[in-house]
Image (cartoon, grey):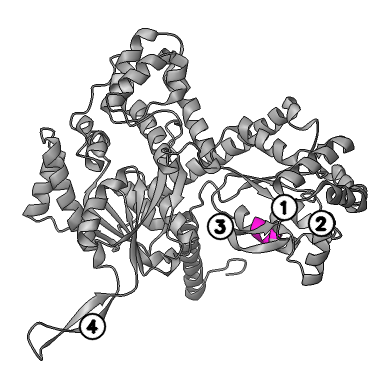
């Protein structure tokens, strides 16, 4: 029939194959997960030597009040010197202020890794030795990176990665005085050599190479840290960008959940056999009348069974050993390589007792992943992993319960970024939600999951029970943990506020709060949590002093530290001191 085309069976088959291929491709794309730091915002700050670039960077961090901001100095990327160049440097005759002194290839490579959310090893340069040291500094998972240096806006490859370009401007005499103070105090130089270098190299190169960078800057900041208007503008811009990224991350988590709803459960999800023992243990753990001592006993027993099951997923190699009977040997197995564990704080610590009973010498790392109370988004606050974790033949991730799977996704991604193979990761949990498991396995199909009990949606009662007993499992010998204190009568959201207190407490534990100084990487986290506390506890901040005693009794009874940001606002230092003598773990930075 003219004008009418009837498709052949082969063409129909090709069309069907194409549709199937598109569907498979769509599913593959849906199974991709990017953490919040995968597209790091990079701010470049250039300016003359001594113009206050570093001070401006710290002022921006203070204004942002965020825990995930890192400063990267271009001083780390000076090229290694030859013996002749090193000798000239000690005579103050080497030009450190020319673009040729910077290793831009290494800088671009490290910035590219950070921009993509990968781990980057930053070189360390010693001005006292005029040499690059063997050790490196690791940068991983910053949401914002501030690159500061005299040539931060010089190389086009760097400019292409910057989200904001800033030029710090200052009077030349002020720059010279600042440089003199810095080089004499921090870099062990003499004044005569500093002045010689200033007029021979620094000042001429400023007009030749540094000053032209003003033309590509988005913002020119005169007066440095005194220019609060410019600092506020930068802070507002960064906050807006991070809010947009947060919304995208939350949408991605929701999409992953929707995409995996109808997917079959992976064969890599291994449930403990529900025999009479397992059902009896679960009954004890869920029953509301179970006392704390029994809860701890049965939970530790369940943890042992979970870890024992996880060991079945690791590789073993044959070995022949001699038995006590003469001339008789036994052909057995021994673990191949190193098996380690990573605890997802805070709840994951309660699985460590079972872990140590099965593998007494197991290496253990830490991750502090907390859910943002307002957005529901998981946030990586702290991590400490074995330096050689990429060579371990098996890594267990310990978390007592998983609901949405957001924290689990982030934890697995951190391990992958540190070189751990996906098929070597075993996620161990007591209770898991169906949606969270499907979401996790759709993104990382090669990992194994060991679970005792699956639920359609994580029961609120069990979640509350595990939260309220976490301290008891961590330290049963502390009498204050035996009986959970009643929440103050005026609290409308007990669990929300307690979780906030525990976050504050855990960050201090990670920082090593027995000392008088905190690592710079954790100061921003403390400030961020404290600001949220001032919002969440308005009745204590706004002068209702009668509630102070009830508040302090609760914090002490829960075995937590006193957040000084609250107690200072209350003006109750005498009460805090007297309560502290009764056995509080400590408060403030002392």
Q: In which image quadrant can residue 563 be found?
A: top left
Residue 542 in percent (x, y) is at 46, 11
Q: On the rendered structure, is 185 left or right of 450?
A: right
Residue 109 in percent (x, y) is at 67, 61
Q: Secondary structure at mark 3?
A: loop
Return the residue at label 1. Answer: 74
| Cα distance between the residues tagged 1 and 4 | 53 Å
Give the residue drawn at x 30%, y 61%. 362
Q: Secondary structure at mark 2?
A: loop
Residue contact between numbered discs 1 and 3, judged by CB atoms under 8 Å: no
Q: Callout 1: few (<14), some (14-19), or many (20+) C-alpha neighbours within 10 Å? A: some
| Cα distance between the residues tagged 4 and 3 | 39 Å
Q: On the rendered structure, is 71 left or right of 281?
A: right
Residue 24 in percent (x, y) is at 46, 63
Q: Callout 2: few (<14), some (14-19), or many (20+) C-alpha neighbours within 10 Å? A: some
User: Which comes before the other along the chain, label 1 or label 2?
Assistant: 1
User: Which comes before the other along the chain, label 2 or label 4?
Assistant: 2
Q: Which residues are magenta?
A: 107-111
Magenta region's main secondary structure? helix
Return the residue at label 2. Answer: 96
Q: In which image quadrant can residue 264 be found?
A: bottom left
């Amino acid at each position: 029939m003219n004008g009418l085309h009837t498709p052949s069976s082969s063409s129909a088959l090709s069309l069907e194959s194409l549709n199937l291929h598109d569907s498979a491709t769509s599913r593959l794309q849906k199974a991709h997960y990017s953490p919040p730091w995968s597209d790091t915002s990079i701010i470049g700050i250039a300016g003359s030597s001594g113009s206050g670039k570093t001070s401006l960077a710290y002022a921006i961090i203070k204004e942002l009040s965020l825990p995930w901001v890192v400063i990267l100095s271009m001083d780390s990327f000076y090229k290694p010197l030859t013996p002749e160049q090193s000798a000239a440097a000690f005579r103050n005759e080497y030009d450190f202020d020319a673009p040729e002194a910077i290793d831009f290839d290494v800088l671009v490579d490290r910035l590219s890794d950070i921009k993509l959310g990968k781990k980057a090893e930053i070189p360390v340069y010693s001005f006292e030795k005029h040499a690059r040291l063997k050790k490196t500094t690791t940068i991983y998972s910053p949401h914002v990176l501030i690159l500061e240096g005299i040539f931060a806006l010089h190389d086009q490859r760097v400019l292409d990665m910057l989200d904001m370009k800033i030029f710090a401007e200052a009077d030349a005499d002020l720059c010279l005085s600042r440089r003199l103070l810095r080089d004499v105090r921090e870099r062990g130089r003499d004044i005569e050599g500093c002045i010689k270098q200033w007029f021979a190299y620094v000042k001429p190169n400023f007009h030749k190479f540094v000053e032209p960078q003003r033309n590509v800057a988005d913002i020119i900041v005169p007066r440095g840290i005194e220019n609060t208007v410019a600092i506020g503008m930068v802070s507002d811009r960064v906050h807006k960008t991070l809010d947009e990224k947060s919304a995208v991350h939350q949408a991605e988590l929701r999409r992953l959940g929707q995409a995996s709803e109808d997917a079959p459960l992976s064969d890599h999800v291994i449930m403990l056999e529900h025999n009479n023992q397992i059902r009896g243990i679960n009954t004890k753990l869920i029953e509301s009348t179970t006392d704390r001592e029994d809860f701890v006993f049965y939970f530790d027993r369940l943890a042992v069974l979970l870890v024992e099951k996880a060991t079945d997923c690791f590789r073993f190699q044959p070995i022949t050993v001699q038995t006590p009977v003469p001339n008789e040997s036994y052909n057995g197995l021994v673990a191949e390589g190193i098996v380690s564990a990573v605890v997802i704080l805070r709840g994951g610590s309660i699985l460590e007792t079972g872990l140590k009973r099965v593998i007494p010498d197991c290496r253990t790392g830490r991750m502090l992943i907390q859910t943002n109370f307002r957005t529901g988004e998981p946030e990586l606050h702290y991590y400490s992993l074995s330096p050689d974790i990429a060579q371990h033949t098996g890594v267990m991730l310990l978390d007592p319960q998983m609901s949405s799977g957001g924290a689990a996704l982030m934890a697995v991604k951190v391990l992958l970024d540190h070189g751990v193979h996906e098929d070597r990761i075993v996620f161990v949990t007591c209770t898991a939600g169906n949606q969270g498991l499907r979401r996790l396995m759709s993104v990382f199909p090669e990992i194994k999951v060991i679970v005792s009990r699956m639920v359609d949606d994580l029961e609120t009662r069990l979640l509350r029970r595990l939260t309220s007993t976490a301290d008891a499992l961590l330290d049963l010998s502390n009498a204050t943990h035996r009986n959970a204190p009643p929440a103050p009568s005026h609290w409308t959201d007990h669990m929300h506020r307690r979780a906030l207190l525990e976050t504050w407490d855990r960050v201090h534990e990670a920082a090593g709060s027995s000392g008088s100084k905190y690592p710079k990487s954790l100061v921003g986290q403390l400030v961020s949590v404290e600001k949220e506390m001032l919002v969440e506890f308005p009745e204590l901040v706004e002068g209702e002093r009668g509630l102070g005693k009830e508040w302090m009794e609760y914090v002490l009874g829960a075995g937590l530290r006193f957040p000084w940001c609250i107690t200072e606002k209350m003006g109750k230092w005498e009460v805090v001191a007297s309560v502290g003598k009764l056995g509080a773990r400590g408060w403030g930075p002392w």
